């Protein structure tokens, strides 16, 4: 059986593909940029990677016609565009038209639990996509989930930030909104077990865990699991805008995503009962168990995917990563340094561990200050960290950088800056002939960009010197 998976670089898609491979299915992974496909996909005989963008129907001919089952996992919740609803609809229309020309028998769509009486823009968009995907040419199975809890999920990481950073929280009244969280591993089971289940054809089913909790209760339970005492006070005077800023400054989320989440969190999300658990023989685990399992993955450094790595969450990257892989030379300022290395394998391991909890090896206080300033001016700051302590893949978030190229065998790492800048910046590390070459390139935008470069030049002198010395030592 051949299965098509869209959204394979997203949080759910990255985790679903290994599930399907374990079951012996042939999987066609659709990506907008082949550079972002997982490295192990290239070595797996059951996987075919194709490049296509559902916003541009002329790119869809790369997708095979002999498809049996297709997963629709395309979401643009954190798209920086103001018209993401129309973009989601266009994606769904193009997907539907193309899939109708294939041999696909069933489309499986992961949506969100909706409250018909009151919908946020995000949830109304999900409902619109579900209505758009319905077809007479194939059967549509829709699973509607609420808050998804797992290592790297946006809800998990935001709650983690709040609980671990704030001993006392003065929080918005939407913390009293009820929801029904579900573990990510249960979501994956529902998605994978629904394949070719005729009793689920042309049906929409809510999936959820056994607990009905307010967001406040979720925070309290999370704190208890972590062995932390937290005082949470809800106030009715915090507007949606203030709530969004509250999430933005305390957590690692962007302001746009925070704003979208706040609008959704004001709506109660309780699933409609069904017999789906019996049909697929799945018993969803509790919120407490989901959090504990998530921390097991974190401690083992085995987080398969993180919401922070989604390219669509970036305000600076527009389109394919291919556009940023060639570092410009003309009209740019460059800080270039090189050092002879004693052990190139140890040095490249240090390069691959850079950022996150490891830090940047030199001038830590200044790196943090730059992060605080970035956050203050509406940037992402340093709070995203990194998904893995030791591994890097193209597209990964790395503090306020994005991984554009990462090849450990070729001993080269290229990062693109996502902090607020009057221009564009790249940071490159590579080892050639036992020489570590470190290049910081800045392409200024107008006079402001040039003034910025000269204002930070004194700091670059010893920060970049200190960093390369530590890496080469």
Image: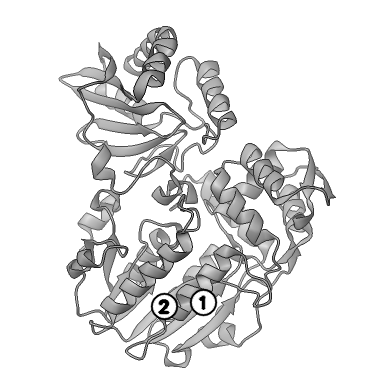
Label 2 Cα neighbours within 10 Å, binned few <14 / some 14-19 / many ≥20: many
At x 38%, y 21%, the residue is 449
Picture quarter with the C terminus: top left
* Residue 298 falls left or right of residue 72: right
CB-based contact (under 8 Å), mark 2 and mark 1 = yes
Residue 143: give its label: 1
Give the mark nearer the N terminus: 2 vs 1. Answer: 2
Q: Position of residue 136 (x, y in %)?
A: 36, 91
Is there any visible trace of residue 234 in the rendered image?
yes
Name the residue that disc number 2 marks.
108
* Residue 126 falls left or right of residue 56: right
Give SS at disc 1: strand
Q: Nearer the viewer, residue 330 or 408?
A: 330
Q: Position of residue 196 (x, y in %)?
A: 38, 86
Question: Residue 426, located in which quarter of the rendered image?
Answer: top left
At x 53%, y 46%, the residue is 298
Compared to residue 252, the image places residue 343 above or below, namely above
Q: Position of residue 317 (x, y in %)?
A: 36, 42
Q: Position of residue 245 (x, y in %)?
A: 66, 41
């Amino acid at each position: 059986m051949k299965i098509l998976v869209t959204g394979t670089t997203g949080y759910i898609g990255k985790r679903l593909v290994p599930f399907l491979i374990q079951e012996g299915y042939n999987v066609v992974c659709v990506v907008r940029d082949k550079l972002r496909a997982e490295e192990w996909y290239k070595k797996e005989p059951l996987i075919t990677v194709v490049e296509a963008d559902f916003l541009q129907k002329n790119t869809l001919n790369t997708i095979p016609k002999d498809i049996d089952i297709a997963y629709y996992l395309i979401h643009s919740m954190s798209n920086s565009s103001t018209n993401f609803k129309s973009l989601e609809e266009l994606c769904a229309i193009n997907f539907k038209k193309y899939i109708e020309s294939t041999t696909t028998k069933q489309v499986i769509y992961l949506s969100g639990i909706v409250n018909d009486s009151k919908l946020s823009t995000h949830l109304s968009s999900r409902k619109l996509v579900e209505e758009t995907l319905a077809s007479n040419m194939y059967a549509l199975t829709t699973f509607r989930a609420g808050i998804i809890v797992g290592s790297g999920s946006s809800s998990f990481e935001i709650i983690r930030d709040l609980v671990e950073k704030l001993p006392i929280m003065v929080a918005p009244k939407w913390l009293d909104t009820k929801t029904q969280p579900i573990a990510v591993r249960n979501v994956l089971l529902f998605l994978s077990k629904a394949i070719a289940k005729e009793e689920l054809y042309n049906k929409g089913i809510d999936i959820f865990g056994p607990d009905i909790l307010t967001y406040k209760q979720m925070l309290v339970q999370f704190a208890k699991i972590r062995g932390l005492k937290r005082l949470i006070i809800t106030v009715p005077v915090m507007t949606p805008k203030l709530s969004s800023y509250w999430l933005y400054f305390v957590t690692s989320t962007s302001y746009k995503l925070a704003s979208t989440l706040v609008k959704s969190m004001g709506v109660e999300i309780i699933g409609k009962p069904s017999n789906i658990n019996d049909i697929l023989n799945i018993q969803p685990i509790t919120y407490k168990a989901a959090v504990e399992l998530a921390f097991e993955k974190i401690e083992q450094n085995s987080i398969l995917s993180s919401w922070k790595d989604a390219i669509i969450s970036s305000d600076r990257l527009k389109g394919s990563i291919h556009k940023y892989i060639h570092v410009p030379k003309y009209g740019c300022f460059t800080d270039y340094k090189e050092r002879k290395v004693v052990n190139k394998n140890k040095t490249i391991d240090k390069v691959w561990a850079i950022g996150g909890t490891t830090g940047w090896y030199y001038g830590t206080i200044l790196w943090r200050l730059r992060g605080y300033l970035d956050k203050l001016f509406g940037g992402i700051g340093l709070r995203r960290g990194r998904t893995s302590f030791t591994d890097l893949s193209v597209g990964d978030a790395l503090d306020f950088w994005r991984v554009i190229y990462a090849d450990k065998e070729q001993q080269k790492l290229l990062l693109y800056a996502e902090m607020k800048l009057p221009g564009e910046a790249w940071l490159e590390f590579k080892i050639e002939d036992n020489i570590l070459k470190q290049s910081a390139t800045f392409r200024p935008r107008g006079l402001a960009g040039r003034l910025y470069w000269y204002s930070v030049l004194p700091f670059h002198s010893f920060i970049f010197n200190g960093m390369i010395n530590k890496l080469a030592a």
